[in-house]
Amino acid sequence: MAKIAVLAIDDDDVQHMLLSRLLRDGSDGYAYELECCHTLESAFYRLDSGRSISVVLLDLGLSGSQGVETVTRFGSRVKDYPLIILTGNSDQDVARRALHMGAEDYLDKTDLTDAILQRAIRYSLERFNLKRDLETARYEREIAFTEEIGSDTDSPVASHLCGQRNLRLAAPSTFTQLVGAYAEAVGDAIEQRAFHVDHRLSDRLQSMADTLGRLMAKPRDVVDIHTEALRMHGDGGGGAPAKMRARVEESRYLLLELVGNLCSYYRRQSVGFGSSESNDKRSESR
């Protein structure tokens, strides 16, 4: 019999007993294993432990955290699991808002039955896995598409000023460092958009472009860095759909900015080279 591990976050012991009874006998062919946490902090610790959890049940009314705040706090830390909201009659509007914040479903605690709860858990898990599979396919298409267009990104200026050898082969350790820095920038870009913090991404991308320019890298090398960073966080098809979608979207902006910065670097070098050549010719004519 297939097993579904359920984590319930609820500070009411009576509710824990009810959920345990409703999930005790899996009449739908699944065996449900229920764990309970009383606070968000203990739930975060449990989820960070690495032990398998299939789905999370979250009560909106916890001690020290109510309504939308509860969903926001949970969502800011955890996106890797399908989430079902447990709510009372007075929380229906908040529960519906939670659906727009990433929850898969919401259930009224006053109307719970074993069939309703088990079906909601099963369907939420199936929807989450389907969305993850769709985002994984989109993620892989993004990598393939970027690699395809990357083969034609070398500009005449860049080709004139730098050699044709791939940076990955010419300087593998530096390439790995740049991939790590770029992947970190993508993560910071996601956090910057979500929490309105300033990670000075433009300055970091400019510095990265200058480094690439000094290494005589080509736009194709930037695309290689971009695709390798995406592969690093592809999670083997196991990543949360929202995370994969955000990574694709934010990395596109970073790729465009970094290629633009690199091209600007080579334009500056080209102008400087042309100016020196003109000065030499004027000196010779004298």
Image: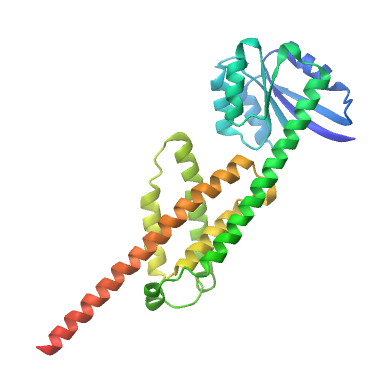
State the quadrant of the C terminus.
bottom left
Q: Residue shown at 56%/16% (left/top)?
A: 64
The answer to whether any part of residue 110 appears in the image is yes
Q: In which quarter of the image is residue 106?
A: top right
Q: In the image, is residue 221 above or below residue 104? A: below
Q: In this view, does 166 lie to the left or right of 210?
A: right
The answer to whether any part of residue 52 appears in the image is no
Q: Position of residue 58 (x, y in %)?
A: 66, 23
Q: Where is residue 183 in the image (x, y as percent from the top left)?
A: 52, 52
Q: Is residue 31 left or right of residue 208?
A: right
Q: Is residue 185 left or right of residue 51?
A: left
Depth check: give the residue in front, 99 or 162: 99
Q: In the image, is residue 25 above or below residue 280? A: above
Q: Is residue 272 left or right of residue 142?
A: left
State the quadrant of the N terminus.
top right
Q: Position of residue 39 (x, y in %)?
A: 63, 21
Q: In the image, is residue 140 above or below residue 109? A: below
Q: Residue shown at 87%/26% (left/top)?
A: 26
Q: In the image, is residue 223 above or below residue 121? A: below
Q: Position of residue 150 (x, y in %)?
A: 52, 66
Q: Residue shown at 58%/19% (left/top)?
A: 94
Q: Quadrant of residue 68?
A: top right
